[in-house]
Image (cartoon, helix red, strand yellow):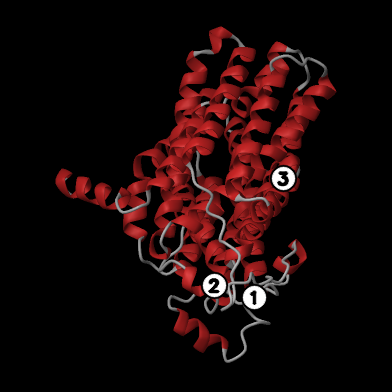
Amino acid sequence: MSIDSLRRSARATVSGLPQGFWWLWLSTLVNRTGAFVLTFLSLYLTVELGHSAWFAGLVVALHGLGGVAGSPLGGMLTDRWGRRPTMVSMHLAAAACAAALAVVTSAWAIAAVVLLMGVAMQAVRPSINATIADMVPAHDVRRAYALNYWALNLGFAIASIGGGAAMFLGYRTLFVVDAVATTLCALIVFLRLPETRPETPTDTAGEPVAEERVSMLTVLRDAPFRTLVLLNLLVCLVFTAPWIGLPLTMAGQGLSPSSYGVVIAVNGIVIVGFQLLVNKLTDKRSPVVLLSLSALLFAFGTGATALAGSPVAFAATVIVWTIGEMIHVPTNAAATARLAPEHARGRYQGVMGMSWAVAAFVAPIGAGAIVDGPGPDVLWAACAAIGVAAAVGYSIRLRKALCEEPEEAAAAAGPVRTEEAAPAAGPVKTEDAPSSVSA
């Protein structure tokens, strides 16, 4: 492929989206560029404050536990309060927590602040995803999610490099910078991003029509969406396992920590360098095919880790499952938007986000226990099996719910759709579905 064709592909990938989306994209980039807390938290707790590695691991796990509560909370606020107020308030809450970490020194005070930070950081995600689904045309939703995910990883790469270079300023200074960046992100949203929550429908006389109330339980009764959440949880478990299992596996083979640092850096490099290309190649593809393919890439990449014996081989496995990540994350978010009614997009995204948070809490504990017990080969074999099971599940269980055209969906489901694919709050908004999905 020539440079000109690559340039044209990149231009096509970023063109045609509304201005509001790019302000949201910028806020994501700014927020992640200053995201130093989680990157350096374990070092701060052990090296600076002298806490044990066990306590550092517990505190990081509390951040994930906070996300389990924060995601449904953010989804509820997004639908009731609005997208913009939820984003601004949760960004400011996260900024306050980052600033607090620069001054508190008590072990349990730090643990409480990190728990609250996990709630705030995860609570903002449903409002971001719902805003994208609100403002972007249906056929571009997947592309928009992919671009936002690219901004997230680009910002994180900048934060990792900048944070490492700025370490001489001290950990507390990094936390203050994180708080400032998150506050700036909230300011961008407040000043430049319009509220996109759909207006209450009216009848022919202009009177507001009461929409059927949607609770989290109602969302979970939506059979296709519940299946999507459970399958995403399986994929998330496989995706999260290498972040704990890979360094332990490499250390067990006598490889140095610096080798692991180089290998895992491949993940960010591939995403930043090739997300736009992957998005171009997967555009307009069937969401079911993309989700199944991504699960298989996770299965193959993690399963092959058991056969790796050198940094190059480990890096090759990381490349494989990273491609799966680039396909899965935007596709899954767009599939969520596709299945959600307009007035319940926040709650749907909140429940989906909870599956990510649960995996972030459970997978590290499980991966560490398996490596210490049966051994790393069992961990990678289990990851491969779970990935294959998820791929089969996508192909068999979601083909009707995520078929390409609304007419196909109606034909596949039969005359009555409610018990199979529609939430109790109303019919599935198939007209909101992109022609392909992404996150």
Mark 3 or mark 1: whose residue is earlier in sequence? 3
Q: Secondary structure at mark 1?
A: loop
| Amino acid at pointer 2 | Lys
Q: Front-most of 352 and 362?
A: 352
Q: Position of residue 73 (x, y in %)?
A: 73, 49
Residue 70: numbered disc = 3
Q: Position of residue 139 (x, y in %)?
A: 39, 64
Q: Residue at x 56, y 24 (%)?
A: 257
Query: For the view shown, which residue lies furthest in the bottom direction?
Result: 415
Q: Front-most of 365 and 326?
A: 326
The answer to whether any part of residue 69 appears in the image is yes
Q: Which residue is mark 2?
A: 429
Q: Position of residue 243 (x, y in %)?
A: 60, 39
Query: Left of 299 or right of it: where is 93?
Result: right
Q: Which residue is mark 1?
A: 426
Q: Label 2, label 3: how many angstroms apart (C-alpha)?
A: 26 Å
Q: Is residue 337 above or below residue 30?
A: below
Mark 2 or mark 3: whose residue is earlier in sequence? 3
Q: Front-most of 408 and 48?
A: 408
Q: Residue at x 36, y 66 (%)?
A: 284
